[in-house]
Structures are given as C-alpha cells and as structure tokens.
Amino acid sequence: MDFFESQEAARRKSGLLIFYYVTAVVLIILGVYTVFSLLINANGNGFWDPALFLYVGGGTLLVIASGTLYKVSQLSAGGSKVAELLGGKPVDPHTIEPAERMLINIVEEMSIASGLPVPQIYILDREKAINAFASGLTPDDAVIGVTRGSLESFSRDEMQGVIAHEFSHIQYGDMQLNIKLMGVLHGILIIALTGYALLRSSLYRRSFGQRSRDNRMPVILLGLALAAIGYIGVLFGNIIKSAVSRQREYLADAAAVQFTRNPAGIAGALKKIAGLPAGSEVRSSHAQEASHLFFSNGVRSALMNLMATHPPVRERIKRLDPSFREEDIQAESLLEETGGAAEDISGEKRSIRVRPEEILATAGTILPEHLEYASEVIRNIPDNLLKFAHDLPGAEAVVYALLLSRDDMIKAGQIQKIRQKTSPEAFSITNIISAEAFSLREEYRIPLLDLAISSLKKDTRESYLRFSSNIRTLIEADGKVSLFEYMVRTMLLRHLGPAFSRPHPPTVMYRTLRSLKPECRLILSLLAHYGVDEESEKSAAFAKGAGKTGVIDPGSLLPKDKCRFKDLEKILGKLALTAPLLKKQLLDACITCVASDGYITVRQAELIRATADTLGCPIPPVLPGKIQG
C-alpha cells in the first residue's frame, strides 16, 4: 500500500463526504418544507410557496449548521475528547498491571517503528466487549483506546495485530476522515432531536379542555414529522459511514499483517470477537456516533448488513486465514505473553548502504524488522531515562538533559539558567540523568525524545510556555543551532505545540513544485551542506536532488552562509501544504540529495526523518544491515 497514494485517496474521499453531506441536507430541507407546507397550506393554497421555502430552508440550514459546528468545536480538542466521550481513562504510564504494561510497550514500539508520535493510550474500563479505536485530528493529537475486554482477552500477538491495524488508520488519513464524519453527521441528528423536543413540550405540558388539546395537535404532528425526517438523515449518514469505512477496514487489516508479518495475530483477535457473547458491542451512549472508529462493529442494528460500518467479522477472518473453519472461533481469556528477546539489530556499523528509493518506499509502513528494532531500542535505553520520560516533570528533565552542551563552560551556563527557570524537581532530575543522557547512543536520542513528548502533552499550557522558553534558552546558549538542536525544536513545535492549541489538519494549497522553486532550492541546498560530509561532493549531491524536482537548476546550489536552520523551519511549514503526491516527489529529491553516494549515516537518516516528519510523512528508522543497495 503506497503511503502517498493512500493519503491522496483519503483527501479525495473528504471531497466525496462533502458531496454526500450536501445531498443529505438538501433532502432534509425538502422533507421539512413538505411538512410545513402541508401544515400551513392545508386549506388548499398549493404546495409551492417560495417565501415559505426560503424561511424553512434557511431555518433548517441554521439548525444543521449549529449542530455540526457544536460537535466540530467539541471535537477540536482532538482524539482525547472522543476517548473521554466513550468513557475512556488514560493509562497510568507507571502501571504494573501486566496487560496494561504490555499495551504500553506495544504502542511505544509501534510508534518508534513507524516514525509517528506516541499516541495517548486510553482504556474503556466499563466495556467488557472486545474493541479498540484510534481517533484524532492529526497524528500529533492521536489517541488509541482499547476496551477492558480486549486487555483481558488478547495475547501479545493479537494485541500487536490490533494496534498495528489502528496505526494504519493514523498513517493513511482514515482517522482524520472519521472524526470529520462525527462532526458532520451530528448536524443531521439535530433535526431528530428538535422533533423530540417539540413532542416532549406538547405531550407533557399541562392542558385543560378540548380547545387546548386541539391547539397542541399541529405541534405534535410537526414534532413527529421532524423526528422521522431527522432519522432519515441519520440513516443516510450511517450508510455514508458504511460506504466510507468498510473498504478501509480491509486495507487496515492487510496493513497490520504487513507491519507484523503475523496474520495469526489479528485473525486471532477477530476469532475471539466472533466467539465472545458480548462480541464487540460498545455500551457507551456515544457509541453510535463513533461507530466507524472502532476495530470491529461497535453497535448493533436491525439493519446490520446495510448499516454496519465494518465488513462481517467472519469475512475478515477468511481474508486473513483462508483455512479458517467455524470451529476455529475461540473465546478463551488472555493467553500468556510470549516472545523472547529480539535480535540485536542496532549494529555497530555507523554508515549504511542504501538506495534512496528504498527509503522512500518505507514511508507510512512498518516492517517486522522495524518492530524488532524498536523493541531493541527501548531495551537499550537506560531504565532511569525511560522511567523519567514516562511522567512529568521527569519528561521535561529528559529533554533538558539531552540538550546540555558537551562544552563544560557552556553547560555550566545552561544549568544555571535552568536552575532559575524550572521547578526544583525538574532541575534535580536533570542533574541525576545528565550523565546517562550524555552517553546515550546517537540513534537512541530521538526515540527517547518521542517518549518524553508523549508525556509532556499532559502538561498545562502555562508550564508548556515556560518549558518552551527554557528550550530556546538551552539551544541559544552557544549562539548557534546544531542539527540535533534543530530536530529537537522542530519535534517539540510540531508534536507538542498542537496539544496546547486547537489542531487544524493542513489544507492543500500547492499542487506543483514550480510555484515553490525558492523553497525547494533552499531545502536541497541546506541538505547538501549539512547532510553531505565531503565538500567536493556537495554540488553533485544537490544536482541529483534538483534533478528529481524537475524545476530546480542543478547548478544553483546556495552558499552555506545562506542556509540556516531557522529558514528551514519557515519553508517546511509552507511545503507541508502541498498535495501528498507532490510531497512524495519532494522527499524523493531530499533523500536522493543526502544519500547521493549510496550510503547514509545515523545523523543523515535522522535529518531525513525530521524533514519528512515536518511534511507529515512519517518514515521509520533506517535499519542497519537491513536496507541494502
């Protein structure tokens, strides 16, 4: 499955959603107008009344728009709001419960392997059924939720398959489309709620005499009609959800198998859903509006085949396991966690032989080798650093410790400033872990930072602003910005900033690189100067990258003093507004430039991953000894 083509397809499907929405609204307006026309023109004045249609249409649009805007505003808080609506509670990062610990490990491994930010993890404690979901407006505010039934029923392989399924929804743009559906369809539901309000106000209002009851009859009829029309809209909306979601579920199942190379894992999870009496039905009152987010059908319906947002469980199992038989369905409880230590694939080799197209092909994918590598990374990070990265204020201290200079004089100045500007606890932890952070292997620093960022999302806005100021102070202590400092600042701005503001998915504004020639020239020049070690090879590297764009003069490399990281931060924000397939072309040029000699170092790989991450195209780690030319 190509990441960029899938992103483009998800973007086009958003346009299809708008078309369906407009169609549904038009049908509802016609339905409401018909009711009012019959009530008002019952004396035979004719069905069509332009003035009445204008008033009714405008009023209906106002009601629908108000309902949609209310729900969109409510969901603008991100995936955590959806999890809370469903009754979810955040997992304690220091939990000692084996099943919860297993879940945290799997999510963190999947994040490191995919290059995506670590999602917040929620558990729906009251739900005994087996289900899971991913939700959020962007990967930065994504959450993954699982029911208590899933924790009690899944083995590690099955849980890994389900989490891989949910990660594919995050990677391929399904998550954003799904949360748009929640907001859009709520507006149509408002019509039904209005009808119910009229019914309640009429049926339960005290009245005396036949005349009073006669006066209420038109209101009762209007309420019944609006409720019926509203639920026609809900039915239409659910059919839309079904049409949008079903094929994406098959693709997510396939992606989970590709990520884990273990079809038995996700197939086993589906077999347990089929065999459990409670199945995958979620009891929350908000399950209906979030039905398309779940791993399996979260609601039951009399029109299950028509209304189901997911393909039948048995059909999904057969696609994953052609030898499936009905007696294979199982409903046993949680199996003992299995799996020994992964092979140490971190390697000693600091320069990896690669082909640029192979790196690009990994965008939006996870290979089993990536999961093994992620598990190895987590095991090799010192326990002290891992412990503090999982909670406040330890996560704050981890970032400070990673930014401390190797120059003793500069480091002394940094420590003095941090002492004045941070909490005593964070400062104390910084001192405790500074030596371990200093000696941490280069390729483990970014994964550790990812874990810390996930914890920092729980901070307050005031603390975040203070923290951001401290980071700027540490980076500017020596008067220059190193590559690692640039990556830290970029990651914090991109992944932590949206947690304290309303995230807005980027809108495509550019569909050709020709309109972005200055930005493309600058980014390729900067990559050539900072990503290529030999001076004599920089011009050739730039030329190879420029050739991939089709619009940049291969001989127009900018001098190094014209290439600054602060300029890169500005232009990457602009380049992030390009169409998915255009991002693919741009990333191809960037990777070709950095890996022009057929080799890539850890530092170069992280530079490429930081650039891709800013463009919204997660690239998993380049694996030593695994990607060969």
Image (tube, rainbow, N blue to C red):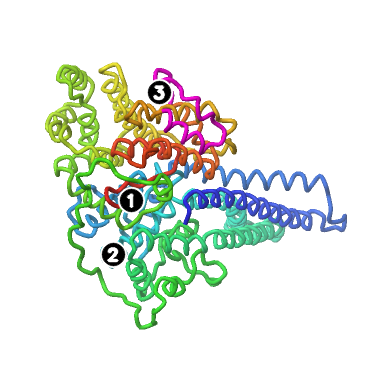
Q: Nearer the viewer, residue 275 or 282?
A: 275
Q: Residue at x 29, y 55 (%)?
A: 369
Nearer the observer: mark 1 or 3; the answer is: 1
Find numbered disc 2 in the image and state the secondary structure of the residue it sits on: helix
Which residue bears the numbered disc 2?
157
Q: Is residue 509 magenta?
A: no
Residue 415: image location, x then y, percent: 17, 21
How dense is the environment of label 3, judged by Cα within 10 Å: few (below 14), some, or many (20 and up)?
A: few
The residues tagged by marks 1 and 2 sit, at their Cα atoms, a distance apart of 25 Å
Mark 2 or 3 closer to N-term? 2
- Amino acid identity at mark 3: Lys
Please tell me the numbered disc located at residue 566: 3
The residues tagged by marks 2 and 3 sit, at their Cα atoms, a distance apart of 44 Å
- Amino acid identity at mark 2: Asp
Which residue bears the numbered disc 1?
627
- Picture layout, residue 535 above or below residue 390: above
Nearer the observer: mark 1 or 2; the answer is: 1
Find numbered disc 1 in the image and state the secondary structure of the residue it sits on: loop
Nearer the observer: mark 2 or 3; the answer is: 3
Instruction: Give the left or right position of residue 114, taking residue 550 as reference.
Output: left
Q: Nearer the viewer, residue 282 or 401?
A: 401
Q: Residue at x 40, y 63 (%)?
A: 283
Mark 1 or 2 closer to N-term? 2
Instruction: Give the left or right position of residue 131, taking residue 449 as reference.
Output: right
Residue 96: image location, x then y, percent: 17, 54
Corner quadrant of residue 534 = top left
Find numbered disc 3 in the image and state the secondary structure of the residue it sits on: helix
Mark 1 or 3 closer to N-term? 3
Q: Which residues are magenta?
A: 539-568
How dense is the environment of label 2, judged by Cα within 10 Å: few (below 14), some, or many (20 and up)?
A: many
Q: Residue at x 44, y 31 (%)?
A: 542
Q: Say whether residue 129 is visible.
A: no
